[in-house]
Image: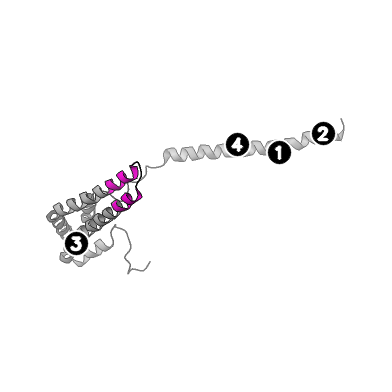
Amino acid sequence: MSIAQLAPATMTRPSARWLLLGSLALNLFFIAFAIALAIRPPAPAPAWDRDVFVRAERIAASLPANDATILRAQIGANRANIESAQAKFRAGQDVIRDSLRAEPFDAEALRASMANARGARQAFDQTIQGVFAGAAAQMSQPGRQALADWPPGRKSAGTKP
């Protein structure tokens, strides 16, 4: 056998080895990735809740006891106003969805429904903010500080890292 006949055989062997090693490494990576996905802890629940009363209760639970009582009383006293404002906002969102689904599509109707929902959202925000402002006026300094730092663990704007 001549050297010309041996050269092609020896050239393909090293590249085949590297291909085999690369394939093995890639397979091990995917196996490790699958195992990591299988044993990871479940995803945490979202930090927000769409129900304003559930969220307000979570905020109240993070306050000092007396301040939590004040907030709960304000929420309870204004519950009908909050529910009404929230229902109007959600209805406005539904009208937007209906406008998007309408055939034939009417861009002006969509713009009008968005403007109405925007107004309803502003009214809802003003209602909630009014309740919190009324409660904060009666709270202690630590309670107002806890409101400012909500959610718990958030650093105050005035604190240094």
Q: Residue at x 68, y 36 (%)?
A: 17
Cα distance, mark 2 to mark 1? 15 Å
Q: Which residues are magenta?
A: 93-112
Which residue is at a point 79% across and 35% down the rendered structure image?
8
Q: Tags 4 and 3 in contact by the CB under 8 Å rule?
A: no
Q: Between marks 2 and 4, how big is the CA–CA gap?
A: 28 Å
Earlier sequence position, callout 4 versus callout 3: 4
Q: Is residue 150 above or below residue 11?
A: below
Characterize the magenta stretch by its predominant secondary structure: helix
From the top left corner, tell me how far across and down residue 40 is, in percent: 41, 42
Q: Are marks 2 and 1 in contact (CB under 8 Å)?
A: no
Q: Which mark is residue 128?
A: none
Q: Quadrant of residue 15?
A: top right
Q: Reading the chain from its start, which is encountered first: label 2 or label 4?
A: 2
Q: Position of residue 138 (x, y in %)?
A: 15, 65
Kind of residue sitting beneath label 2: Leu
Name the residue rendered at 36%, 45% in the picture: 105
Location of mark 2 (residue): 6
The image quarter in which residue 157 lies: bottom left
